[in-house]
Image (cartoon, coloured by chain):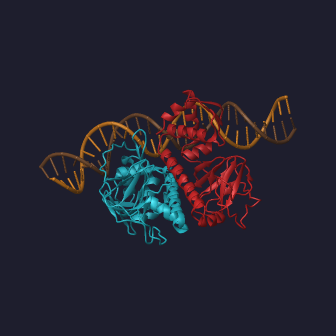
Chain colours: A cyan, B red, C brown, D orange
Amino acid sequence: MLTRYSVSRLRTVPSPRPPDGPLPEIPAVFGSVDLLGLPIHYQRNAEIFGESEPAEFLYKVVEGAVRTCRILADGRRQVCAFYLPGEVFGLEAAKRYHHSAEAICDSSIQLIRRSTLLRVAAHDAHVASELWALTAHELERMQDHALLLVRSAQERVACFLLEMAERLTSAETVELPMTRNDIADYLGLTIETISRTLGQFADEAMIALPRSRRILLRNRKALRQLNA
Amino acid sequence: MLTRYSVSRLRTVPSPRPPDGPLPEIPAVFGSVDLLGLPIHYQRNAEIFGESEPAEFLYKVVEGAVRTCRILADGRRQVCAFYLPGEVFGLEAAKRYHHSAEAICDSSIQLIRRSTLLRVAAHDAHVASELWALTAHELERMQDHALLLVRSAQERVACFLLEMAERLTSAETVELPMTRNDIADYLGLTIETISRTLGQFADEAMIALPRSRRILLRNRKALRQLNA
DNA sequence: CGACGCCTTGATAAATGTCAAACGTCGTGG
DNA sequence: CCACGACGTTTGACATTTATCAAGGCGTCG
């Protein structure tokens, strides 16, 4: 079902560190002026952080795409989530991450030191509330994802396409950053099932597949009807 | 896969309302002295709140058990989570619940008015932080649940048993409050698969089943080996 | 051009769902 | 006390979905 995962990651150590010294006393939030450092570049497949490492930073995708994963005891991999430009990941209340994060393609990412953020949140209710909202939003996404995992292969793939389309573009063409393998591990299916299902959607003219990563949503309504 | 869900819920309207007037100015947290009102009693299968209702309260189980669910467009039901005594549910950042909650068996539950809690959190960093921690903990549980949903039926059932054992009792005997149907909808399987898998575990002497809801964990190590 | 990584396709097997029937338990009322 | 009915559970036969294994194709980059 899930792919066996052999570890051969190139680990990029972030070079310019975001500031942790004296705090800006302005009410600082993610959206507005910020605690964010300069973007750091990660190569395709570079590990951003590893499972059960100390949760030192929060991350915001500037460009590119990121996947977070967990590895099961038998080596299978589950992709927990994808993060696209503008989205924040690495949000943990615990001391350690409970999943790893990797760049799907060359990406630039801003880091926020967790300790800094928590210190600000402790005396700024607005930041604290935003932190909470981000976590709750993540929770919602996770719930939606869990809902997806109990459905048929067709439903999962259709929902995935619509979700990506919504998050990546306003146009008809979706340029996926991730491989079939990533999609399979995200949806709890095999690459063969992903491929066949996409092929079937193309046969039924719901989508077109000019290249494997480029998908044209020809009939969103039909795709949506496969969903709850 | 999931059960078709016909709605015939007895709706219990909570009679004694938790206080919302002048606030206790003590730093108030869930664990310690509290914003909690008197426990309210809900009958078996009573709806505590419905999907997409305004999120007016948070809830803490005193006695009994609660399930939260989402209904898919085609009528299938997914049980998102079970809540047992001492656990908090109804935690949403959004204005509305995105799932419903029902009493699995006769239960007594304490309510906390959301607006009250938010007001306290706004000027008490400790409460705000606890609110965040609770949400993050919920997120973790959800992630674990999602991981479960991509595994084999055996793994799901074994993991469910171990989880329930840990949360319900320190002893060998687990008295489940929920039906096979609830379990099936929680694990994304059918009641038949649940029943057969339990039977198989019993055949292999990993568990014993004196009654359908009473399960003796005879060999936790073997059950654990099915998990990641 | 050749090699590698990624993707597709086909044949077959395994896991799980579906449908149907029977069983057990528990509470109710005769 | 027993009979009955409702509900939840178990079991069996069979269908369907999806995984697995194997082979080949396409594209890209050296």
In the depicted structure, whether residue A59 falls above or below residue A149: below
Residue B25 placement, left or right of A111:
right
Q: Position of residue B41 (x, y in %)?
A: 74, 52
Front residue of this view, candidates B113 and A16: A16
Residue C10 placement, left or right of B9:
left
Residue A129 placement, left or right of A188:
right
In the depicted structure, whether residue B167 falls above or below residue B20: above
Residue visible at 58% across and 47% down? B185
Work out which residue is located at the far front of the displayed protein and give it: A22
Q: Quadrant of residue B20?
A: bottom right
> In which quadrant of the rendered image does the N terminus of chain A lie?
top left
Front residue of this view, candidates A87 and C16: A87
In the depicted structure, whether residue A117 falls above or below residue B187: below
Residue visible at 58% across and 57% down? B130
Q: Quadrant of residue B50?
A: bottom right
Please say whether residue B2 is visible from this viewpoint: yes
Please say whether residue B95 is visible from this viewpoint: no
Tally of numbered discs: 0
Q: Position of residue A184 (x, y in %)?
A: 39, 49
Residue visible at 54% across and 37% down? B158
Front residue of this view, candidates B103 and A112: A112
Q: Position of residue A22 (x, y in %)?
A: 43, 66
